[in-house]
C-alpha cells in the first residue's frame, strides 16, 4: 500500500480511537471505540486484489484535498482530520449494514467547518450502534432508556411486533401477561433504529424483555364479529360490540412495553388502581381506521363501545382509544387524543416505559422520513 494511503488510513483510525468528545456529553468508552476501529478494519479487508481495490477506493475518497467541494473551506489540520473520520465512519456503517453509500459520507466534504464537530459526534454514535453488542447496548442504556422522548424526537424508530400472545385476546386464560424477548438495533439501510423479536444476520443488537401487545383484527374481538362460519339457517344474532375486548396485562418485571407499528390501528388502554391493560386492534380488511376508532368509543350506532373485559376492575377502567384521526386517549401532556389519519404518515410507533409508573410514547414519521416532532410525544 503506498505510503500516503497507509498514513491517511492509520491517522484517521487514530482520530476515531482517540475520540474524546463523547456523545451528547456521555463519554464513549475506549472498549467501544476499539470495537469501531475493528469494525472499520473488518469492512475494508485487503487480502485479495478485489478487496485491495475497494480499500484503495475508500481511502482515496476521504482525501480532503481531492474531494472537498469547491467553495467549501477545508479547515485546519484538525478540521480535515474530522472530515476524513466522518467520511470513513459512514463508509464503514454503510458497508456494515449492506446499505451501500450513505449520504452522510459525501456530506463530510461539503459541510462548513462549524458543522464538523457535531457531524463527527453523530458518526461515532451510529458507528457504535453497528460496531458491536457493547456499542448498541451503550446506545440503549445511555441514550434511549434515560430519555426516550428526546431519543425519538431525534431518531426514527420502527417497532416490529410479534403475534405471540394473540390467544390471550380471544378467550379466557389463567393470566394475561405476555412478556417477550426483543432486540434493539440500528439498521443503516433504512437509517433508523428498530425493535424486533428477530435477530439480524449481520447487525448487533441489545436484547431486553418487554410486555408485548400483539395486534388483533377487529373481527376477532369476542362478540364483535363477523362470524367466520355463519349458520346455515338464519338466526337472530346479538348486536356487534367491543364490550368483550380483552387486553394484555402490564404486570410483571419488564420495564418496557412494545406493540407493532400502527397502520390505521387503534391502541386501547385501560387503567385503574395501578393495574394497566392494553389492546391493539387493526382495521383492515373491513374498516377504515377512523371508523374503527369511533366504534371503539361507542360513537357508531349499533356497535357497542369497548370495555377491557378481562381487566380486574373493568367497570372502573374506561378504555382510552388512540386511533387514526379519532380517539379519546387520556393524553396528559397536550396534543390530540389521536394520531394523524392513516395515509398521511409513513410509520407510527407506540411503546411504554415503566419508571415508577407507566409512561407511553408515540412517534410519527411523515412521508420522506421526517419525524413529525409535534406528533412524536409522551402521551401519559
Image (cartoon, rainbow, N blue to C red):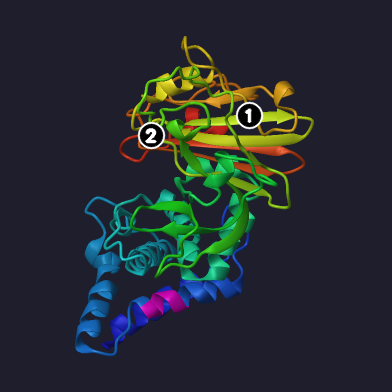
Residue under the image location 52 percent in, 36 percent down: 280
User: Disc 2 designates what residue?
Assistant: 229
Q: Which residues are magenta?
A: 38-42
As helix, strand or loop, the secondary structure at mark 2 comes to loop
Question: In the rendering, at what x and y percent does residue 41 appear?
Answer: 39, 80
Q: Looking at the rendering, in which quadrant would you find the C terminus?
A: top right
Q: Quadrant of residue 229?
A: top left
As helix, strand or loop, the secondary structure at mark 1 comes to loop
Residue under the image location 36 percent in, 49 percent down: 112
Question: In the rendering, at what x and y percent does residue 222 appear?
Answer: 53, 31
User: Disc 1 designates what residue?
Assistant: 308
Disc nearer the start of the sequence (2/1): 2
Q: Quick check: 245 above or below 61?
A: above
Q: Please give the label number shown on residue 7.
A: none
Q: Looking at the rendering, in which quadrant would you find the N terminus?
A: bottom left
The front one of 56 and 265 is 265
User: How many marks overall?
Assistant: 2
Q: Quick check: 338 above or below 80?
A: above
Amino acid at each position: 500500500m503506498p505510503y500516503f494511503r497507509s498514513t491517511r488510513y492509520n491517522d484517521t483510525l487514530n482520530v476515531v480511537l482517540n475520540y474524546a468528545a463523547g456523545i451528547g456529553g456521555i463519554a464513549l468508552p475506549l472498549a467501544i471505540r476499539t470495537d469501531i476501529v475493528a469494525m472499520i478494519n473488518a469492512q475494508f479487508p485487503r487480502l485479495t486484489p478485489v478487496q485491495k481495490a475497494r480499500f484503495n477506493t475508500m481511502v482515496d475518497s476521504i482525501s480532503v484535498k481531492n474531494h472537498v467541494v469547491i467553495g467549501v473551506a477545508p479547515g485546519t489540520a484538525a478540521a480535515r482530520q474530522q472530515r476524513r473520520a466522518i467520511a470513513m465512519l459512514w463508509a464503514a456503517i454503510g458497508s456494515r449494514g449492506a446499505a451501500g453509500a450513505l449520504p452522510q459520507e459525501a456530506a463530510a466534504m461539503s459541510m462548513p467547518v462549524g458543522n464538523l464537530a457535531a457531524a463527527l459526534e453523530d458518526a461515532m454514535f451510529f458507528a457504535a450502534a453497528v460496531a458491536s453488542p457493547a456499542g448498541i447496548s451503550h446506545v440503549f442504556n445511555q441514550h434511549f432508556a434515560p430519555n426516550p422522548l428526546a431519543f425519538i424526537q431525534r431518531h426514527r424508530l420502527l417497532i416490529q411486533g410479534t403475534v405471540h400472545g394473540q390467544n390471550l385476546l380471544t378467550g379466557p386464560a389463567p393470566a394475561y401477561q405476555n412478556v417477550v424477548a426483543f432486540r434493539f438495533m440500528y439498521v443503516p439501510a433504512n437509517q433508523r433504529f428498530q425493535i424486533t423479536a428477530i435477530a439480524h444476520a449481520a447487525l448487533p443488537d441489545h436484547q431486553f424483555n418487554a410486555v408485548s401487545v400483539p395486534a388483533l383484527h377487529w373481527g376477532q374481538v369476542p362478540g364483535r364479529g363477523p362470524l367466520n362460519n355463519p349458520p346455515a339457517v338464519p338466526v337472530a344474532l346479538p348486536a356487534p360490540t367491543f364490550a368483550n375486548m380483552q387486553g394484555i396485562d402490564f404486570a410483571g418485571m419488564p420495564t418496557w412495553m412494545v406493540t407493532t407499528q400502527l397502520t390505521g390501528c387503534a391502541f386501547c388502554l385501560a387503567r385503574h388502581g395501578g393495574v394497566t391493560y392494553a389492546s391493539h386492534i387493526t382495521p383492515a380488511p373491513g374498516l377504515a381506521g377512523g371508523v374503527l376508532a369511533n366504534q371503539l368509543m361507542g360513537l357508531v350506532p349499533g356497535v357497542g363501545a369497548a370495555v377491557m373485559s378481562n381487566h380486574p376492575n373493568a367497570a372502573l377502567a374506561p378504555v382510552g382509544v388512540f386511533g387514526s384521526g379519532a380517539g379519546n386517549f387520556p393524553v396528559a401532556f397536550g396534543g390530540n387524543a389521536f394520531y394523524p389519519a392513516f395515509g398521511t404518515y409513513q410509520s407510527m410507533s407506540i411503546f411504554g416505559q415503566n419508571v415508577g409508573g407507566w409512561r407511553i410514547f408515540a412517534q410519527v414519521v411523515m412521508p420522506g422520513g421526517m419525524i413529525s416532532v409535534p406528533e412524536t410525544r409522551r402521551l401519559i
